[in-house]
Image (spheres, rainbow, N blue to C red):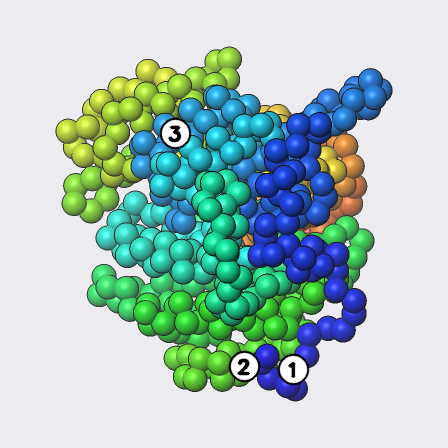
Amino acid sequence: MGNEILKAPEGPPSDVERIKEESNYLRGTLRESMLDQISAGISDDDNRLMKHHGSYLQDDRDLRNERQKQKLEPAYQFMLRVRLPGGVATPDQWLVMDDLSQKYGNSTLKLTTRMTFQLHGILKWNMKKTIQGIHASLMDTIAACGDVNRNVMCNPNPYQSDIHLEVYEWAKKLSNDLLPRTRAYHEIWLDEEKVASTPEVEEVEPMYGPLYLPRKFKIGIAVPPSNDIDVYSQDLGLIAIVEDNKLIGFNVAIGGGMGMSHGDKATYPQLAKVIGFCKPEQIYDVAEKIITIQRDYGNRSVRKNARFKYTVDRLGLETVVTELENRLGWKLDEAKQFHFDSNGDRYGWVKGVKGKWNFTLFVEGGRVTDYDDYKLMTGLREIAKIHTGDFRLTANQNLIIANISTQQKKKINDLIEQYGLTDGNHYTALRRSSMACVALPTCGLAMAEAERYLPTLIDKIDEIIDENGLRNEEITIRMTGCPNGCARHALGEIGFIGKAPGKYNMYLGAAFDGSRLSKMYRENIGEDEILKELGVLLPRYAKEREAGEHFGDFVIRAGVINATTDGTNFHE
Ligand code: SRM
Ligand code: SF4
């Protein structure tokens, strides 16, 4: 396959490659494992396959020690992630997700950084019913995780609804067309009968092949001036080019990604680089060929170096572009001019096209639930019952109640007020620009808290913000519980990565529009030191900044930190 001069790295295939190979196109023994009544968990091999079906086996880490002491197996439960291209859900779909989370989950919905729903806390015995419930409402969980193309993101911008609609249709099409073709999902979860004959390999997975990709693959489409989906963090980023209010095509950017491992300089976050322009109807071809390049040359031996960003950096950008154009049989056009102004969301009411209204709600940490003093989940349920437009989950873990008719606006606004649902205007702009990954207690990889801790840390940072008159300054702040970067920490102007309970590496200097990575400023520090550092830097920013200067740019100009000019010098 592919160009004979180009080579994939040598080395024995990783264990996951063996599991995929032996799985008969993602079936493995998942069906049997799910029926087994002895354990609430499943085998490691099946859990690797499970990801391709949109789910992970987890255990409640808050209960881990106690259960160990009592010699009980961990409190096993499953996380389930929906594939929701572009983050658009109907009110009925919202109600279904709410209902499933009450019946089978932990009565919360997580709005993720890739604009979809996650359910947490589902017991093995309820998994099939939950997936069937999702399927009945015309959603699925196929390829929401795993070594395949994931949920395709796109800008949910209500300011340019006509362009959004078109871009959304492309995102949906890409997501559907790039799905794995195996019937494993339908057989295991939806009771589809297995077809007796074994088709030829090419027929089952013409694009992926029997081993699928070396690693996950992510696509996102931005519509300038908003870079809310962090287009440079994608394996394949598409930037919509609009001329005379018409979508003429997309700039293509390749090789982004956020993950890395502490202390391993061979791993680093990287930004996708713009390589050219193509017409809308060419994006499937471009995506497919890029995916097959990664399929053929990605690292199948060392998983932590297996993302497409490392393939691009190893082979060289020019080589990859040449290979892409050879596979396409045509050349990309020169990239078009564009401009981003931020990677955050804009909150509150806004009127879109055709007289429809949109309300962007601030959802701290993306967690929808009923808090003691804030009935967010109930409020949204009541809205979904009468709403005739749609919901848009944003890449910053927020929610747009979208496409509201003028007649309905008052009713929806009454519910917003009745339940105190907030656009975050009474908060500092810092809090409104915050993101935190799930981390504890469900994420098996978390080294420290994120979603459960960032709000209280911000309470304390807010005091410094207020003392220095920075209440309305948008400064992006992002926290992750480990270096995998699920809240795209390396693109936050202030970033924290969990190192150990209560300890974080602190990063500074990312660009407000998501076009420059941050750099480590302090290692392994706790809350007191974090507040001490910000207690010096924020007042300096308040006094010394130039007009319109963002915090991420200021710390570089003021010499606090060197700029990261490429992922390969992130650690320098
Ligand atoms: Fe992520 C793994 C949660 C977006 C990079 N991510 C995980 C797992 C599944 C942990 C695991 O492997 O056991 C987390 C489940 C936690 C839980 O309890 O729910 C998890 N990732 C999330 C979510 C829910 C974070 C959130 O709070 O919103 C996001 C779900 C997105 C979605 O809907 O598909 C999420 N993850 C991201 C992003 C951001 C993005 O895609 O825009 C990244 C960085 C971008 C990238 O991929 O480079 C990201 N997640 C990772 C990685 C590191 C991958 C790497 O290249 O090294 C892992 C670990 C892995 O794959 O081995 C990971
Ligand atoms: Fe878990 Fe780490 Fe991702 Fe946070 S960044 S959800 S701790 S894998």
| Quadrant position of the N terminus in the picture | bottom right
Contact flag, marks 2 and 1 (Cβ < 8 Å): yes
| Quadrant position of the C terminus in the picture | bottom right
Kindly identify the amino acid type of the residue bearing the numbered disc 2. Glu
Residue at (75% x, 64% y) in the render: 13
Q: Say what secondary structure mark 2 lies in.
A: helix
Count the labels in the image. 3
Assess disc 2: are there few (<14), some (14-19) or many (≥20) residues with their C-alpha within 10 Å of its C-alpha.
Answer: some
Instruction: Measure how far apart labels 3 and 2 are at the Cα level.
Output: 45 Å
Counting residues from the start of the chain, the first of labels 2 and 1 encountered is 1
Instruction: Measure how far apart labels 2 and 1 are at the Cα level.
Output: 9 Å
Assess disc 3: are there few (<14), some (14-19) or many (≥20) residues with their C-alpha within 10 Å of its C-alpha.
Answer: some
* Residue that numbered label 2 is attached to: 323
Counting residues from the start of the chain, the first of labels 1 and 3 encountered is 1
The picture places residue 344, in percent across and down from the top left corner, at 45, 45
Q: Say what secondary structure mark 3 lies in.
A: helix
- Give the label on residue 96, or none: 3
Q: Nearer the viewer, mark 3 or mark 2?
A: 3
* Residue that numbered label 1 is attached to: 6
Q: Is residue 419 visible?
A: yes
Lateral position of residue 337 relative to residue 353, left or right? right
The picture places residue 36, in percent across and down from the top left corner, at 66, 32
Relative to 118, does residue 495 appear above or below in the rendering?
A: below
